[in-house]
Image (cartoon, grey):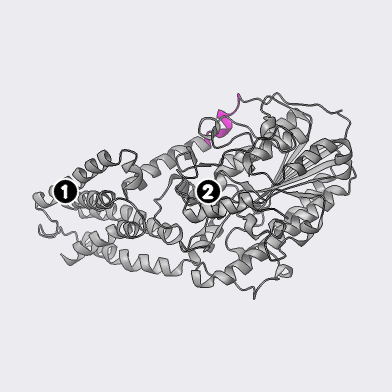
Amino acid sequence: MAMVVWTFAALLTPNIMMICQWHKPLLMSLTNVLVPLGLYMVLLTYVRKTWMTLLWQVLFMAFCAFEIVLINMYGPAPIGVDMFLNVVTTNSSEAGELLGNLAWTMLLIFAIYLPSLVFGVVINKQRVSLPKSMKINKRRITFGTLGAGLLVAAICKICYPAEMLWREVFPVNAVCNLALAVDRGIDNKRYDSSKTSFRYDASSVRPQDEKETYVVILGETTRADNWQIFGYERPTTPDLAANSSVIGFGKAMSQSNTTHKIVPMLLSPLEADNYHDQIYDMKSFITAFKDAGFKTFFLSNQGRNGAVIDGFSREADSVLYLRDTNPYALDGDLLPPLKEALGDKATKKLIVMHTYGSHYSYFDRYPNWCHTFGKDTPSQLMLTNREGLIDNYDNSVLYTSYIIDQAIKAVGQDSISAALFYAGDHGEDLFDDERCRSLHASPSPTFWQLHVPMLMWFSPQYEERHAEMVATARANKDKPVASNVALCHTLLQAAGIDTHALKKESSLVDKSYKVPKFLFLNDYNEAVTLQEAEFHKNDFVMLNKMKQSPLP
C-alpha cells in the first residue's frame, strides 16, 4: 500500500509544483489535482496485467520528469508543442550540455520516480498480481475522485470560460501537445513537396551587370541587453560600436523564442499573423534572389534537424553545414567559407550565414582569446552561478561581434555595392529577476527572450548609389522593430528586388515604414498580444524602458 501511495504522490508532484508557483483560481488548482488523480486511480484499478500497469507508469512518469525540468527552468509552464519539437530538433551534444548542467534536478527526478519503477519491474518479473487492497479496487473511491474532478472542471469552465482546460491540466495537456507535435513533425517532413506552388515572381530593378553582394547573418540566443552598442556597460561589441557605418536597431523584438519558428520567419515574409496558414507553403527570400539573378549561398554552423530551416537552406545554389563534418565547430569557422563565397565570380550574390551564437553552454561558444570577462570557467545553470554565467555569455557576445566585424571587412574589400544585415533569432533569460528564469523557448516568454540585436551595414559604394535608403535606415534606427518582419522586406527593397511579397511599410529603408504592434507566436501557432502571452509586470517595465530610452 505504501508503494501505491508513493506512486500517486510521484505522479502528482508536477501538479503540486505548478500550483505552488502559478496564480490561477482555486477551482483551476483543484481541477489540476483531482482530474489527474482520478485518471491515475482508474488506470491502476482496471489495468489487470502488471506489465501494462508498468507501461503506463513509465509513460506518465516520463511526462512528469520532463515537466519538472521545465518548471525548474521556466516556472509553471506546461510541456508545450514547441518543447516536444525542440527535443527532436536539438542535436545530441546540445542536449548533453544542458542535461549535464541540470544535475540536481535530474537527481531529484530519479529519487522520486525510480522506487516506483523498480517496484513495478520486480512485480512484473515475478508475474504476480497486486492484491485487491493495493489496486484500490473500491470503485466508489475511484469514480468518486474522478467524478469530483470532472465536476470541479465543469464549474471552473462555467466560471472562467476563457480558460482552455485541455491546455492547463497536466498530463492532459502533455498528451494533447505531443499529438500536435507529431502532426507538425509529419508536416515538416512533407515541407519540400507542399511548397512547390509558391512563387515570388521576383526580378531585379537594377542592371544585370551591376555588381552587388548582400550578406545576412542570423544570430542565435543573443539578447540585445548584453550588447555594448545598445547601451550595455561592458565593452562586448567594441569593433561594431566604433564603426560609424554600422546602424544598430536597439528596439527590435522577436515574435518567437524558438529557433525552429523564428528562423523561417527571419528568412521569409512569414510573421506571427500568417505563420499558421502559410508556413508549409512558403519559400525563403533565397528563392526571390535566385529569381532576380543572384547566386545564393547558405552557410550554417547549426546541425541539420529536419525542420523547415533545412528546407529553406536547400533553396540555395550552394549549401554548407559545418557540423556535418565538425560537430564542435565555432562560428568563426564560417569566415573562410564566407570569403570563398565572396570570391565567386558571380556578379550578384546573396550569402546567408546561420550561426550558433550564444547558445548554452556559453563557455563552449568562443575560442581562448575571447576570455575577457570574469574568471572564464564553465558555469552550471544555477542561480548561485549567475555572475559566472553572465561572464561566459558576454564573452560569447564579444566573439559574435568579432565575427560580424570580420564579415564586414571581408565584404568591404570588394569595393562594390554591398550590404550586411545581422539579426538575432531570440534572446535568453539569465536569472534576471525574482522569477529566476533561464534559457529560452518557454511557453510564456520574457522581455529578455524577445529583445534581440539587429544591425545593418552598407558599403560606401552602396551608400553613394542609394543614399536615400541608407539615410532612411538611419532615421528609423530608434523606432521599435519586429525583427523578423523587418528583415525580409528591408533586404528585398535594399537589394532592388521587385516582388509581390514586398511590403514597403515593413521595410526599414522605406520612408513609409510603420511601427508594428508587438505580437508573439505562441505554442499553438496563434499570434497573440504580449498580454495574452502572459508577459509579467517586470517584462512590461523593461519593454517601456526600451521604448523610451535614447539609444547610443
Mark 1 neighbour class, 10 Å CA radius: few under 14, some 14 to 19, many 20 or more: few
Q: Which residue is drawn at 45% across and 69% down?
A: 103
Looking at the image, which is closer to me, 522 or 263? 522
* Span colored in magenta: 189-197
- Give the secondary structure at mark 1: helix
Query: Who is closer to the viewer here, 268 or 347?
Result: 268
Residue 278 within the segment the image draws in magenta: no
Q: Which amino acid does label 1 sit on?
A: Tyr
**Residue 374 visible, this orientation:** yes
In this rendering, the answer to whether 71 lies above or below 167 is: below
Closer to the camera in the image, 101 or 388? 388
Q: Name the residue under label 2.
A: 89
Residue 493, percent from left and from top? 75, 33
Specify whether residue 300 is in view.
no
Q: What element carries label 2?
A: helix
Q: In which quarter of the image is residue 267?
A: top right
Residue 9 screen position, x and y as percent: 25, 62
